[in-house]
Amino acid sequence: RNIPDYIQNEIFFSHHFRWQKSQGLDEHETLQILPEPLQHDISYEVKRRVLHLVPIFKPLPLIVQKRICHALIPQVYPKDSIIYSVGDIGHEILFIVSGVVTVTLPSDLSELDTSGKSNAALNKEKFEAIGKILSAGNHLGESCLNSNSGVRQETVISKTTVELYALSKDDLNGICRFMGSDKEKEFKESFLRRNGNIWHFFDDLPGMVGPDKSDNEEQDLLHFPWSDSAQSFNGSRRPTNAVRRRRLSQARRRSLSYSSRDVFRNMFLERRLQRDDQSSRSVVWDPGSPRGN
């Protein structure tokens, strides 16, 4: 058939990878004939390593963890594949289980929807805080939670073989029905406030209704692990830029103390990828493989 070679190669790679993992067993078809509680138990045993890698999932009740595992869809990408590009439509959050990806932000915002354009500055601040090289434990595409259109706001490319698990927005909404409205809001906002072990956003989220501020400001701040006092927060007005910078600095210091191994690992990966990019400048890419560019 008239399918470009690079697409055929990615199809072959994906099937070969899944064959190595399951030895030809169609997990979805096999689970469908079993009772639903047993499906959840099996999915949890098979996919719970994803929960262990993503800090957001760890405090959830077991019943919610099982439903999340059951909804996760595996994906795999070979090196130098475009996972998604700016302007693509996607309604899934992607969780990295293995491999390394790089993120590129758009210089031209014309491909973004209204939500993406209004959040472009916040998106830039996020990747300045967490870095543009992501690996196991990080997630991507969470902007779909406060966007009706699902237009992607960045381009993500695999720098190694990458194994991901996708959680659709619809499945997430269905799972959150078991959590109660307050826990649901807190859980969804956690995807937009942190990535891996690094917190990067502290204010009320655009497009989402923030929680009511109580008179006890210190109690409000206790929800966040970096807060040592309520003196830098005024519940009656939005924080100043100086307060935002101080909170970001606190979050970075705390993130380093919580997960220094992850931070130094990302620093090492960034340097290694820079060396790889320099050494590959003399390589002539096959023009028949546009995704290799």
Image: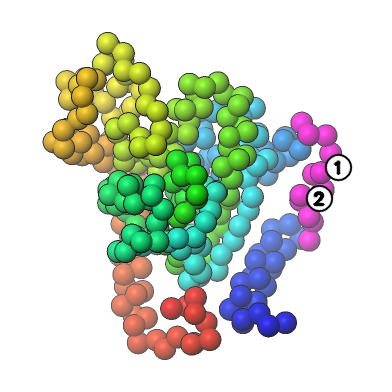
The image position of residue 146, as x and y in percent, is 45, 41
The image position of residue 96, as x and y in percent, is 50, 52
Q: Residues within 10 Å of mark 1 (few under 14, many from 20)?
A: few
Give the distance between the C-alpha atoms of the residues marked 1 and 2, in whole angstroms: 7 Å
Q: Which residues are magenta?
A: 24-38
Q: Is residue 142 visible?
A: no
Q: Residue at x 58, y 50 (%)?
A: 165
Label 1 close to label 2 by CB (< 8 Å): yes
User: Measured along the vertical axis of the image, is residue 4 above or below residue 74?
Assistant: below
Q: Residue at x 19, y 30 (%)?
A: 239
Residue on which the image places disc 1: 33
Image disc number at residue 29: 2
Please identify the quarter of the rendering in which residue 223 is found. top left
User: Measured along the vertical axis of the image, is residue 218 above or below residue 199?
Assistant: above
Amino acid at circle 1: Ile
Instruction: Say what secondary structure mark 2 lies in.
Output: helix
51 left or right, relative to 238: right
Identify the coloring.
rainbow
Q: Residue at x 69, y 66 (%)?
A: 15
Q: Residue at x 51, y 33 (%)?
A: 58
Nearer to me, 72 or 137: 72
User: Measured along the vertical axis of the image, is residue 167 above or below residue 105?
Assistant: above
Q: Is residue 129 magenta?
A: no
Please identify the quarter of the rendering in which residue 199 is found. top left
Q: Is residue 36 magenta?
A: yes
Nearer to me, 74 or 148: 148
Amino acid at circle 2: Glu
Q: Is residue 36 visible?
A: yes
User: Measured along the vertical axis of the image, is residue 99 above or below residue 61?
Assistant: below
